[in-house]
Amino acid sequence: MSLKKINGLEITPTHSINQVRYGCTLGAMYSAAAIPGAIPIAHCGPGCADKQFMALAFYNGFQGGGYGGGAVPPSVNAGEKEVVFGGNERLEELIKATLKIMRGDLYVVLTGCIGELVGDDVGSVVSPFQQRGVPICYAETGGFKGNNFTGHELVTRAIIDQFVKDYDGKKEETLVNVWSELPFQNTFWRGDLAEIKRILEGIGFKVNILFGFGSKGADEWKTIPKAKFNLVISPWLGLETAKHLSEKYSQPFLHYPVIPIGAKETSKFLRTVADFAGLKKETVEEFIRQEEKEYYYYLEHFSDFYAEYWWGLPARYGIVGDSAYVLAVSKFVVNQLGLIPASHIITDNPPEQYREGIEKEFRSLSHDVSEEVIFVEDGYWVKKILENTDFGHKPPIIFGTTWERDTVKKFGGQVVEIGFPASYEVVINRSYVGYRGAFALLEKIFTAAISASA
Amino acid sequence: MSKKIKQIAIYGKGGIGKSTTTSNISAALSTLGYKVMQFGCDPKSDSTNTLRNGQYIPTVLDTIRDKANVNAHDVVFKGFNGIYCVEAGGPAPGVGCAGRGITTAVQLFKQQHVFEELDLDFVIFDVLGDVVCGGFAVPIREGIAEHVFTVSSSDFMAVYAANNLFAGIKKYSNNGGALLGGVIANSINKPYAKDIIDDFVKQTKTQVVEYVPRSVTVTQSELQGKTTIEAAPDSAQAKIYLNLAKKIAAHESSKTPEPLSVGQLRDWAAQWADHLLALETGTIESSHSNI
């Protein structure tokens, strides 16, 4: 069966994945770890948790595990005994020990493949703790259920249903819950979420950013039901959560597929959100005016370089990564830099029902740019597609991952690592989105381009 | 060079008389002078009870649960006439993975070469009901049992379980797995019961090894915690078990069965149902040759 044809290639299923571009469902332990004060507890075999750490939080920007991730999470380390007799007792023992020695505001038990295949009733182990008032919940995240994107929504839902629980009180008029990038999978999530929070607060919102430094952790999650609405800023991730919340707490949601990068997109984004929430126009416009003033001050200086250095800059780009960044970065470089698109490859395996919507976004990248996007996960196809792409006579810029380095070396382009795994990037709180993040991205792109001849 | 150990697995639907039959085969083989081990592969761990006066023995898995390194000899217990009794054991009902438990227990014995060390003539695996998952197929996979016998009555569900087992055997037959010795037809008292089983083995290209009638002697013996061979050695029933054991001892060549598809099995059962109904209402003629 042919999936699609692109650049003269017929993309057929390979039934294998070379060069992984996401974690397994259990990787969502990093969604838990991304909540300040939360501690994931892994109900899985030895090695599972460490693999997720190394993949998502280490060789991906060297982000580090922090308070609840990395080498910290307690694990059942299920062996033969737990397979044959079930792992419930061991898990109970582990939770008790964890509560004794690790202080957390929220504990999230995540089950791996072993417990799920054996049929461990994790709920029956966790619920007595919940009844005693321990802030703990569990998510069934056996690796066979999908990737860490799938796991993220399972964990989010588990926390909402088991920890945040029911609410039918008042809503706060300006409070908004933000569901956007996948923590740790997106190498730049910490800086990005901080910027998103900053700009939304700038126009008058109170923001539940929920993950990262800007989140108030478990206390903030408790206020999710009070928000006036949910804001999903991504092509598809977070939609399941938003739909669930609309049923659970009667909260409407706004789906904004493009994570905004640069003044043009960001101002448009802020106006749309403000309009949806009915914010005061004056405050919104004043903030946008201030931000754009600063933005264009810097951009004006940058324009000398951009105008004069034309002979040494890339004209075309290819992009490989998670749908969120592939769309966001493409919008920015096409509309604000005038780069010519050559190849768009999405590798986060979005659920079928969202793919048409994503394709539609690419068909209107700009008022005069319509592009096709291809969904593949196997590194074999990513390589083939890039090799078969016509990038013109100048070396292109390739937005991708560490996996693209060898491929790109062959045709002499430059790689800007924008996603998992970004093993040649050290990322602390760099952001590539919003008003401020756009500059970091510009700096990265053109430093890469001009240093090629260094 | 060590002698060849005959390894046999006995399968069948739960409650069909598998353990009763297996224990009596073991007992009969031992009275014939063979060195026998009976290996119960059922989390209920009661396969060998009638070989040990109704007493339960510690199971392989219970021992593994408590200790990391287990000497397999520690979980071998002698029963009637020197028969070695082993129970694989398993998790509590509804917990863990019993199939993996069977695999673990059997592998422990294989790794420690216990069968060879005990200089056995026969190892008989008494395996729980249906082949529900890979774990319960371990005794019929490569390198363990060579011959499989299935205990079945003429009840449709027992035949269904037997047919499933045949499918399992066929699946592994190309990879050195065990082959089918035949069906031990249990609780065969009514003439039509024999006809049903005979027809089933014909359809699936196998054979009946022995017809074992339902007998109160078996019940009486079991209530004393004994096999019929031990409790009533001179009974007619004991002779039947002895005869069955001799056939199994002499059995050399097993075959790949031809299981029926679900649809075929249903049609086959429906025809028999019609026939039995006709028999009851008296509209039956002399034969059921159309089946």
Image: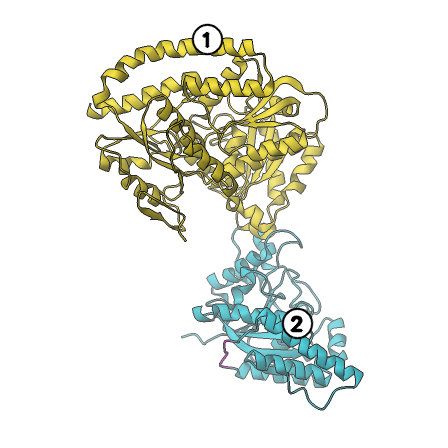
Chain colours: A yellow, B cyan
- Front residue (pair B119, B49): B49
Left or right placement of residue B232 versus residue A291 in this view: right
Say whether residue B253 is magenta.
yes
Name the main secondary structure of what is drawn in magenta: loop
Q: Is residue A443 above or below residue B127?
A: above
Tell me which segment is drawn in magenta: B252-256
Left or right placement of residue A446 versus residue A113 in this view: left
**Quarter of image, res B281:** bottom right
**Quarter of image, res B228:** bottom right
Name the amino acid, label 2: Ala
Secondary structure of the residue carrying numbered label 2: helix
Q: Position of residue A177 (x, y in %)?
A: 58, 24
Name the amino acid, label 1: Gln
Q: Which residue is mark 2?
A: B158
- Front residue (pair B264, A28): B264
Say whether residue A343 is magenta.
no
Residue sitting at x 35%, y 27%? A425
Label number found at residue A290: 1
